[in-house]
Image: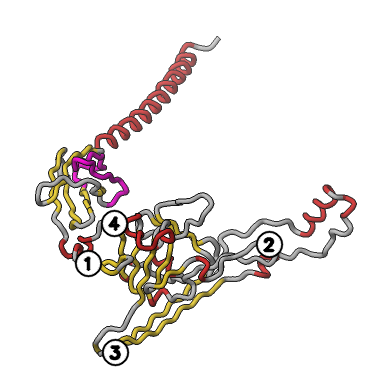
């Protein structure tokens, strides 16, 4: 039988350990709960109404919290409701034909916002199927991109200039082969069996996928080509994308999948101007396939096809991908002279 002091100390130490563990667990849960409450407390719901300078409610205005991906759009009555991460958040409002505006929430729950018309953008000229018109006179869905709006960097095909630049337009490179076909979709697929590629119009001349290389099947077939491969991206001045039926009506059934109008650079009056650009880039395989070594292949052959084990012995290991691939180096140099009287 243990002496009283020893037994008391052991029991006290055991209870003290349990209490200490319980206290630590309680503190951890308390910290997590308080952190969640703090995060919820920082989130603020903001409501507002967006109108024009004439008092007209604006539908479809993009409302985004600055510095985040949180956003929404106004409904038919011009109102919106969204949660922001902090009480002093800044909202960025943008709408076609109106100047972009930044509004500070500053702890307000309801906002009344007025957007001013952007007269300069409304007088910009866009290209349509039957000529050029001002933006304010356009009723169809048209997106106009100038050379300053194009993607920067090394672009080997004109359609890469607008990749990710316009809503409702998808541009995907099918292969890494130079001059390979590119998938361009305007407002998604419109047909199951027929083609879904848009019509390209280069300086008034309609092009199609068959203008370059339609591709083929079988042993002698080839991949489809890009109709814009021969066109230097540096020679393009602007692109106009016609999306809806009213904008593409003049092209008939050929414009059923949308129309991309490409305008090349032209000479302007004034002194001659020489422009030179140069760029370079490299590309590598992201991941090489894992294959068997010679010894592993021989062992696998013995297991699966023992009768062919002798004929499967082809010598040492050779990494075919290392032999046939290397780092690709791409260079692009352009020199142009413009001028006129």
Real-space CA distance between mark 2 and mark 1, rounded to the nearest whole angstrom: 50 Å
Q: Height in image: 3 above or below 199?
A: above
Q: Earlier in the sequence, mark 4 or mark 3?
A: 4
Q: Position of residue 108 (x, y in %)?
A: 14, 40
Q: Earlier in the sequence, mark 4 or mark 2?
A: 4
- What secondary structure prevails in the magenta region? loop
Q: Earlier in the sequence, mark 3 or mark 2?
A: 2
Please report the residue visible at 25 percent of the width from the left and 38 percent of the height from the top: 43
Q: Which quarter of the rendering shows the C terminus? A: bottom left
Mark 3: give few (<14), some (14-19) or many (20+) Cα within 10 Å. few
Q: Position of residue 253 (x, y in %)?
A: 43, 58
Observer-nearest of 37 and 324: 324
Mark closer to the observer (4, 3): 4
Q: Residue 47 has which mark?
A: none
Q: Residue 272 has which mark?
A: 3
Q: Position of residue 55 (x, y in %)?
A: 10, 47
Asked which secondary structure carries label 1, the reply is: loop
Instruction: State the extent of the magenta-drawn residues as a range.
Output: 67-89
Real-space CA distance between mark 3 and mark 1, rounded to the nearest whole angstrom: 26 Å
Q: Earlier in the sequence, mark 4 or mark 1?
A: 1
Asked which secondary structure carries label 2, the reply is: loop
Q: Residue 140 has which mark?
A: 4
């Amino acid at each position: 039988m243990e002496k009283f002091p020893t037994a008391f100390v052991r029991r006290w130490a055991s209870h003290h350990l349990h209490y200490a563990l319980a206290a630590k667990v309680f503190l951890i849960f308390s910290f997590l709960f308080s952190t969640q409450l703090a995060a919820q407390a920082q989130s603020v719901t903001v409501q507002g109404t967006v109108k024009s300078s004439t008092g007209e409610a604006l539908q479809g205005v993009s409302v985004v919290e600055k510095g985040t991906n949180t956003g929404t759009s106004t409904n038919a009555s011009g109102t919106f409701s969204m949660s922001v991460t902090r009480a002093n958040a800044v909202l960025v409002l943008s709408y076609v034909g109106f100047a972009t505006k930044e509004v500070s929430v500053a702890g307000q729950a309801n906002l009344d916002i007025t957007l001013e018309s952007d007269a300069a953008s409304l007088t910009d000229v866009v290209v349509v199927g039957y000529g050029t018109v001002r933006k304010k006179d356009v009723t169809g869905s048209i997106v106009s991109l100038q050379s300053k709006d194009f993607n920067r960097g090394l672009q080997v095909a004109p359609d890469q200039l607008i990749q990710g630049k316009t809503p409702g337009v998808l541009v995907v490179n099918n292969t890494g082969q130079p001059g390979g076909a590119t998938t361009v979709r305007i407002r998604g697929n419109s047909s199951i069996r027929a083609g879904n590629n848009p019509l390209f119009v280069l300086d008034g001349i309609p092009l199609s996928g068959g203008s370059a290389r339609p591709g083929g099947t079988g042993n002698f077939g080839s991949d489809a080509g890009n109709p814009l491969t021969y066109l230097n991206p540096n020679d393009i001045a602007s692109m106009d994308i016609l999306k809806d039926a009213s904008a593409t009506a003049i092209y008939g059934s050929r414009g059923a999948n949308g129309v991309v109008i490409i305008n090349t650079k032209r000479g302007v009056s004034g002194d001659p101007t020489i422009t030179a650009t140069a760029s370079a880039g490299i590309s590598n395989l992201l991941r090489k396939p894992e294959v068997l070594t010679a010894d592993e292949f021989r062992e696998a052959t013995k297991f699966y096809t023992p009768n062919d084990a002798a004929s499967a012995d082809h010598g040492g290991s050779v990494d075919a991908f290392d032999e046939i691939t290397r780092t690709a180096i791409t260079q692009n140099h352009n020199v142009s002279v413009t001028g006129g009287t």
